[in-house]
Amino acid sequence: MTANNVLLSVDNLVKHFPITRGIIFQKQVAAVHAVDDISFDIHRGETLGLVGESGCGKSTTGRTILQLYRPTAGSVVFDGVDLVALRGEDLRKMRRKMQMIFQDPYASLNPRMTVGEIIGEPLVVHKVAHQKEINERVEHLLELVGLNPAFANRYPHEFSGGQRQRIGVARALSLQPSLIICDEPISALDVSIQAQVVNLLEDLQNQFNLTYLFVAHDLSMVRHISDRVAVMYLGVIVELASRDEVYYHPLHPYTQALLSAVPIPDPVADAKRQRVILQGDVPSPVNPPSGCRFRTRCPIAESMCAETRPEFREIEPGHFVACHFAERFL
């Protein structure tokens, strides 16, 4: 992959949420370290899967990239432009090229608006089409996502969860973006519907050369849809590599623990594999551990893990790991 092929470059991104006390004179007493110094690139036309357990900062990363949350530090360079430096109208224009599919299809659609108004709203806000063109575009988008164009005059409560998420996909596509951040788009859906939505996303990616950041905690689904996978733990990325490298040759103890918990359909192979059982609970993001974030639960942690934060380094070509002892697993 060449540098010219990079659509999104995230460098040293930090997002802390302040914790304040006081009614009139508020004073910051602490901060939630939701995202703490992460860096990665996404190439045009690829899907980067971002995985990790609940509360590790995956969704915050996606929202901070889109500038829905303003970062505490770092840069987000999209198509050659640093979004962090933009304000007002300049940022609004760039948002046409970036869209988001939200996790909850029940909460992300306005119940007072018809499906046609929901899908057409981005076109109205950005003033890129007149009403007749908007109506035609809405009908075309509904067909693209597998819904009847006659549904445009219906309201969200008349649809199932899977159909609502298709409406959310159509809304995200309305401005013909380059990047779509999929924030756990299938976690609220029935298992039977999840595959349909994922297949739809793949078809649309091939048709329009879309680029995805696919946020999820379902490792088997991420394996299916992603080209590369980033593993996140307590606000930091601990491993980043191609899909097959992460699943067949994980070099970080946390990634190994995650993968050992994924059920496999072969009972013989399942009985032979070694389970990694992590001790203790995930530390609080308000007061994360010193040094390596994972050291309090890591089976191979040593004293230096508490003193020095491991560098996020390239162990093998394209395989990045934040662990002092990653070479042990080569």
Image (spheres, helix red, strand yellow):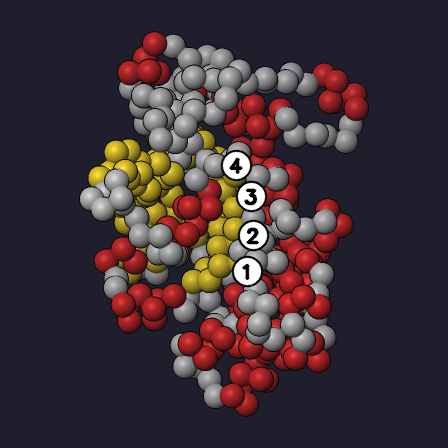
Query: Which residue is located at x 46 percent, y 46 percent?
Result: 59
Q: Amino acid at mark 1?
A: Ser
Q: Which type of secondary structure does the marked residue at label 1 adopt?
A: loop
Mark 1 or mark 2, earlier in chain: 2
Measured in 3D between alpha carbons, the distance from the residue under mark 1 to the one under mark 3, in whole angstroms, is: 17 Å
Q: Which residue carries the number 4 mark?
A: 54
Task: Determine whether label 4 and label 3 are within 8 Å by CB.
Answer: no
Of residue 326 and residue 138, the one placed in the foreground of this image is 138
Q: Amino acid at mark 4?
A: Ser
* Marked residue nearer the N-terminal end (2 or 3): 2
Say what amino acid the circle numbered 2 marks: Gln
Residue 6 placement, left or right of 169: left
Q: Crowding at label 4, few (<14), some or many (≥20) Cα neighbours within 10 Å?
A: few
Can you see residue 329?
A: no
Q: Nearer the viewer, mark 1 or mark 2?
A: 1
According to the picture, the residue beneath numbered tag 1 turns out to be 108
Q: Which residue is mark 3?
A: 216
Cα distance in 3D space between marks 2 and 3: 10 Å
From this viewpoint, which residue is outermost toward the top? 303
On the image, the x and y values in percent for residue 79 come to: 35, 60
Task: Answer left or right for 81 relative to 52.
Answer: left
- Proximity of marks 4 and 1: CB atoms separated by less than 8 Å: no
Determine whether label 2 and label 3 are within 8 Å by CB: no
